[in-house]
């Protein structure tokens, strides 16, 4: 699979709404990434290593963010800052949708951390 096919596959998983097959494919891509068999050319070797150490959830979120490209035609006539905001909004929507589906999204992070680690931890 070449780079264009890979990113098309990830975009299709997003567009299809994260079906069970799509989620399995993302897990597979994450495993390849973590084992060093999938190289994310946008990352330096140090960034690739750090992303891998973050685990599958971190890798998948990074891949989803990388797949969300705004076509220039959607952004014609806008200044660069607005273009970047539009790009970030698409990334956020894709990552949040995936994270909610796989149960790794927390609306109230403070409550989750306090519940998980108690109020006596460094998070309290």
Image (cartoon, grey):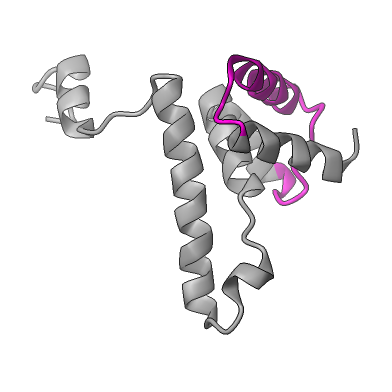
Say whether residue 29 is left or right of residue 53: right
Residue 59's place in the image compared with 114, above or below, is: below
Tell me where residue 102 sits by quadrant: top left
At 61% from the left and 50% from the top, the residue drawn is: 68
Where is residue 106? Give x, y as percent.
29, 29
| Magenta extent | 16-45
Where is residue 24? Give x, y as percent.
65, 15
In the image, 46 versus 110, the foreground residue is 110
Q: Quadrant of the C terminus?
A: top left
Residue 118's place in the image compared with 83, above or below, is: above
Residue 30 in the magenta stretch? The answer is yes
Q: Quadrant of the N terminus?
A: top right
Where is residue 22? Give x, y as percent.
64, 22
Residue 11's place in the image compared with 68, above or below, is: above
At 65% from the left and 46% from the top, the residue drawn is: 67
Decide if residue 7 is in sight here. yes
Residue 42 in the magenta stretch? The answer is yes
Tell me how many marks there are: 0
At 60% from the left and 36% from the top, the residue drawn is: 14
Tell me where residue 9 sits by quadrant: top right
In the image, 15 versus 63, the foreground residue is 15
Where is residue 70? Give x, y as percent.
62, 60
Decide if residue 55 is in sight here. no
In the rendered image, the residue lying farthest to the right is 2
At 53% from the left and 81% from the top, the residue drawn is: 78
């Amino acid at each position: 699979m070449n780079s264009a096919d890979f990113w098309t596959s990830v975009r299709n998983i997003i567009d299809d709404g994260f079906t069970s097959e799509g989620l399995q494919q993302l897990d597979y891509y994450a495993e390849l990434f973590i084992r060093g068999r999938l190289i994310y050319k946008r990352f330096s070797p140090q960034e690739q290593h750090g992303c891998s150490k973050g685990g599958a959830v971190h890798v998948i979120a990074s891949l989803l963010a990388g797949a969300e490209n705004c076509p220039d035609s959607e952004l014609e006539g806008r200044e660069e800052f607005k273009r970047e905001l539009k790009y970030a909004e698409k990334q956020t929507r894709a990552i949040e949708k995936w994270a909610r589906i796989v149960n790794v999204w927390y609306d109230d992070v403070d409550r989750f951390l306090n519940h998980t680690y108690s109020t006596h931890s460094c998070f309290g």
